[in-house]
Image (cartoon, helix red, strand yellow):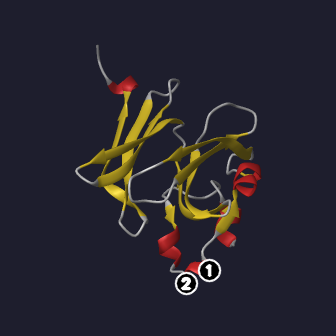
């Protein structure tokens, strides 16, 4: 359970449930929706991270996925997103923790020729920083990072 306690605090790259190599499905990290929505932790900045929103994604031939976003309690931005797979009976299996200092603008589903992915867009109007990247959903319902991770800064563009 140490992964649950680290939250956004020290993660600069996504943490995947499959990287922890659980011996069986019974050892996966499973949460209720209430547990997901009431999680909080201290971020590296000293702010308390709290649940901001949840969004469900439905794909043909896959379990429902849940994206839960988290961010500083004192603001409206989300900087972390945890992805979960519906495990039935009101429970969700943790899949991926994703963090960036750049706030989340949107998380969208993409289905193309039988391939399923989640596209994450991040942007910060103050700094001009932006990111765009995706996670692919495998047939065995594991989220894996996409091949491209784009970053750019509006402030770098000369008019």
Quadrant of image for the N terminus: bottom right
- Dividing the picture into quadrants, the one containing residue 24 is bottom right
Q: Are marks 1 and 2 in contact (CB under 8 Å)?
A: yes
Query: Which residue is tagged 1?
Result: 27
Where does the image place residue 109, in percent across and percent down from the top left? 40, 43
Q: Could you tell me which secondary element the residue under label 2 belongs to?
A: loop
Where does the image place residue 31, in percent across and percent down from the top left? 69, 63
- Nearer-the-camera pick, 140 or 41: 140
Query: Which residue is tagged 2?
Result: 24
Q: Which mark is residue 40?
A: none
For residue 85, above or below residue 17 = above
- Residue positioned most to the top: 159
Where does the image place residue 66, in percent across and percent down from the top left? 56, 51
For residue 155, above or below residue 136 = above
Q: Does residue 39 appear anywhere in the picture?
A: no
Q: Residues within 10 Å of mark 2 (few under 14, many from 20)?
A: few
Q: Residues within 10 Å of mark 1 (few under 14, many from 20)?
A: few
Quadrant of image for the C terminus: top left
**Left or right: where 46 falls relative to 66:** right
Q: Does residue 16 appear anywhere in the picture?
A: yes
Give the residue at x 34% y 53%: 116
Q: Could you tell me which secondary element the residue under label 1 belongs to?
A: helix
Distance, label 1 to label 2, CA atoms, is 6 Å
- Nearer-the-camera pick, 116 or 29: 116
**Left or right: where 54 falls relative to 19:** right
- Residue positioned most to the bottom: 23
Give the residue at x 72% y 49%: 37
């Amino acid at each position: 359970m140490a992964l649950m306690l680290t939250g956004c605090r020290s993660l600069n790259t996504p943490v995947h449930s499959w990287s922890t190599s659980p011996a069986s499905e019974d050892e996966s990290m499973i949460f209720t929706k209430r547990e997901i929505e009431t999680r909080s932790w201290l971020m590296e900045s000293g702010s308390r991270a709290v649940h901001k929103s949840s969004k469900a994604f439905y794909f043909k031939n896959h379990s429902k996925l849940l994206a839960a976003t988290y961010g500083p309690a004192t603001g409206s931005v989300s900087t972390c997103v945890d992805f979960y797979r519906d495990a039935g009976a009101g429970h969700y299996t943790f899949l991926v923790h994703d963090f960036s200092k750049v706030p989340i603008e949107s998380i969208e589903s993409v289905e193309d020729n039988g391939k399923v992915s989640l596209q994450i867009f991040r942007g910060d109007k103050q700094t001009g920083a932006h990111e765009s990247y995706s996670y692919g959903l495998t047939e065995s319902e594991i989220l894996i990072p996409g091949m491209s991770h784009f970053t750019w800064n509006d402030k770098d563009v000369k008019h």
